Amino acid sequence: MDRAQKEQVVEELGQIFEASGVVVVARYEGMTVAEMQDLRAQMREAGGSVRVAKNRLAKIALDGKPCASIADYLTGMTVLAFSEDPVAAAKVADKFAKGNDKFVILGGAMGDTALDPAGVKAVAQMPSREELIASIVACIGAPASNIAGAIGAPASNIAGILKTLEEREAA
């Protein structure tokens, strides 16, 4: 890798560190290519990405970024899992780590907050952005549906009474 390629990698990593809601650092030593492809597919499905980069270049890219605290985790064979959604990458990484002993979460960062492995696990248990939006919409929509039901109820009651009176007259 020549100097220009290294500069390009550092720039790409810098953009990743700035734009990501969460970055998870994990050790992947001993994983097969198929396992790594499975991790990438799961992460892509959740809206995140996985990146393997030289630790030295990643540390250079971290300089001055909000998540600079993860530089301590960048030793050995590490992989970066990241997503714009502050929960997606942590959820996928935690789920994958439960099913694969070779994938060990070292820590991460959520903005400028450093996360240890327990912190990543706690973030993974939080509801995702879509789940939060759905619950907020449900809370907002519930009163409106209750009002519509209350407004429509008297009309249906009157219709039921009129029908009963008609049936009595007909009988």
Image (cartoon, rainbow, N blue to C red):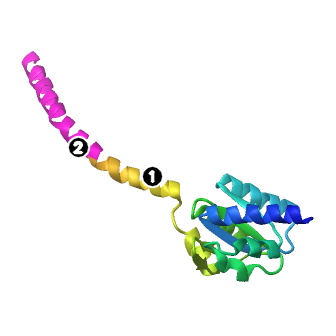
Quarter of the rendering occupied by the N terminus: bottom right
Which residue is at 64% across, 55% downward? 46
Reply yes or no: does residue 66 show up in magenta: no
Q: For residue 148, which quarter of the picture?
A: top left
Marks 2 and 1 close (CB-CB < 8 Å): no
Label 2 sits on a secondary structure element that is helix
Residue 140 percent across, percent down from the top left: 33, 50
**What quarter of the picture does the C terminus occupy?**
top left
Answer left or right for 39 relative to 20: right
Q: Residue 166 placed where, x, y %?
A: 11, 20
Residue 109 visible here: yes
Tell me, for residue 147, which label it has, or none.
2
Q: Amino acid at mark 1?
A: Ala
Q: Nearer the viewer, residue 166 or 170?
A: 166
Residue under label 1, please give it. 134
129 left or right, relative to 109: left
Residue 145 x, y percent position in the rendering: 29, 43
Q: Quadrant of residue 90?
A: bottom right
Q: Which residue type carries mark 2?
A: Ile
Q: Position of residue 69 (x, y in %)?
A: 65, 80
Report the residue that reaches farthest toward the right: 1
Write down the region rendered in magenta: 144-171
Q: Is residue 113 shown above or below 95?
A: below
Q: Main structural element of the magenta stretch: helix, strand or loop?
A: helix
